[in-house]
Image (cartoon, coloured by chain):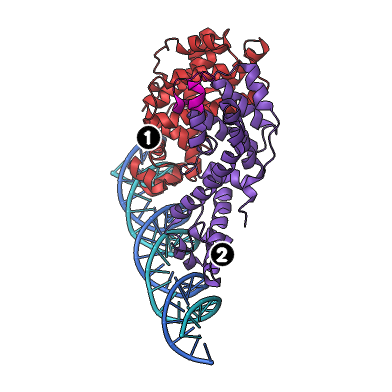
Chain colours: A red, B purple, C cyan, D blue
Amino acid sequence: MGPDMPGSEPRNRADRRRLRTRAALLSAAREVFASQGVDASTIQDITEAADVAKGSFYNHFDSKEAILRAVAEETLAELARALDALTEPMRDDPARVIAVCLRHTLRACIEDPTLGWFVLRAGDVIALGDVALGAYGRRDIRRGIESGRFRFDDVELACTMIGGAADALLRRRLEGALPPDADAALAAHALRLLSVPDADAYAIAGEPLAPIHASGADRV
Amino acid sequence: MGPDMPGSEPRNRADRRRLRTRAALLSAAREVFASQGVDASTIQDITEAADVAKGSFYNHFDSKEAILRAVAEETLAELARALDALTEPMRDDPARVIAVCLRHTLRACIEDPTLGWFVLRAGDVIALGDVALGAYGRRDIRRGIESGRFRFDDVELACTMIGGAADALLRRRLEGALPPDADAALAAHALRLLSVPDADAYAIAGEPLAPIHASGADRV
DNA sequence: GTCAACTCTGACGAACTAGTCATTTATTCC
DNA sequence: GGAATAAATGACTAGTTCGTCAGAGTTGAC
């Protein structure tokens, strides 16, 4: 287990130096991918943004795809952790869990456009639906269907459509084309898709959202 | 007006030769873009697939973006024409128009995966939502809202979410992950988003779909 | 202080790509 | 048939990007 593995505290100055370089590359990659798109980004773009020599890149990653995967994993884990903690107290109401997951994810991506654009532009590796409705969200949709709160045959189909709507909504929002309360609209839409009655859907989707800043925990 | 303009019949052999080259490039470009994605495709890929020398490309298009636009326009116009003709007889029922547009577009993209992947991968230039809900679809949604058949505040928001769901659905379907009747699910989803009662939505979305093959008209 | 191990550095070569242009080929008109 | 016009061809240049590697810089152990 080298110094790269999460959880292993850097013991000495040498390890910290290595980690610093790696972290600079990861952070720069997220920004570059977000602003230019993955395909248009070159490894030089990343190393220049990280203020690191080109050769150093290959000390840490094999290719552009490798660092993309690493950034995506980091991002995904970070958001999933925050969502899980946030929805812990409302486990008994799947509708509320779904609404909060969707709204919180969307808001996080809107408040931090670098994060938002990265998620959109890393499309093949990470999808907004998978972030907001990852293992947990799917589980709650399944629970809702079993308990009769939701009505929908195919969980994957529902997740696909909700995720796609979330992606499109986020894109238009980041382009400045939609009202600020789009997150509530998305949540209401998802609940209606799952056959929650209109009145309930709007009520749940419109509840005030706990203002957490979970993603600030591991900003370097 | 040169021989490139649609509608002007090629008069002589020289014009036909030029048109043949241009058509070969357009068709090859659609296939190459569909199979590799736009960014990964080079102009050489296109000319090789078209069995045409590299220099010839620049007799017809200025750049990759130019031919991408041309293919997208062609595709869009083709689908829009077919949809317009198909929905002509049901102009008085916006719900039915929306359902038929969505289902037909999705089916066309599924039956012709080259078309489907092209639409998905030309993302910035053409979007599935814009195809299925172009000027006509938006007009019908607006009509439905005015007539009280639909309930939704923001037409753009609705189109964005429906279009995003359609994109995601098509992608998963082309990857082979969803059942064949996904087109009906999408239509039902869209109608429910617009607050059409569940029973009506399912009934309209499940109606048998007229089997047209409009896109076969200008296959070369 | 010295040495071994490790990381960082940036110049370099190989491979690829866009766009150009002089030449060849096809077609039309006389 | 022959000249004129226009399109097709593919070799070529210039510029980019990748991935490597020998040398310089840091660090920790002794």
Q: Is residue B146 magenta?
A: yes
Query: Which quadrant of the rendered structure holds the C terminus of chain A?
Result: top left
Q: Percent x, y for residue A58?
A: 45, 46
Q: Callout 1, which amino acid?
A: Arg
Callout 1: residue from which chain? A
Q: Percent x, y for residue B28?
A: 57, 57
Q: Is residue C19 above or below residue A38?
A: below
Q: Percent x, y for residue A189?
A: 52, 20
SS assignment at label 1:
helix
Residue B209 or residue B47, whichever sits in front:
B209
Q: Residue at x 51, y 7 (%)?
A: A89
Q: Nearer the viewer, mark 2 or mark 1?
A: 2
Residue B110 or residue A219, whichever sits in front:
B110
Q: Is residue A41 above or below residue B92?
A: below
Q: Which residues are magenta?
A: B141-158
Determine which residue is flagged by label 1: A20
- From where the camera sits, is residue B34 visible? yes
- From where the camera sits, is residue A81 visible? no
**What label does residue A212 carry, if any?**
none
Q: Percent x, y for residue A117?
A: 42, 34
State the CA–CA distance, disc 2 to disc 1.
Answer: 58 Å
Q: Residue at x 40, y 19 (%)?
A: A181
Determine which residue is flagged by label 2: B20
SS assignment at label 2:
helix
Left-right relation of A45 to B101 = left
Q: Callout 2, which amino acid?
A: Arg
- Have a look at marks 2 and 1 and say if they share a chain: no
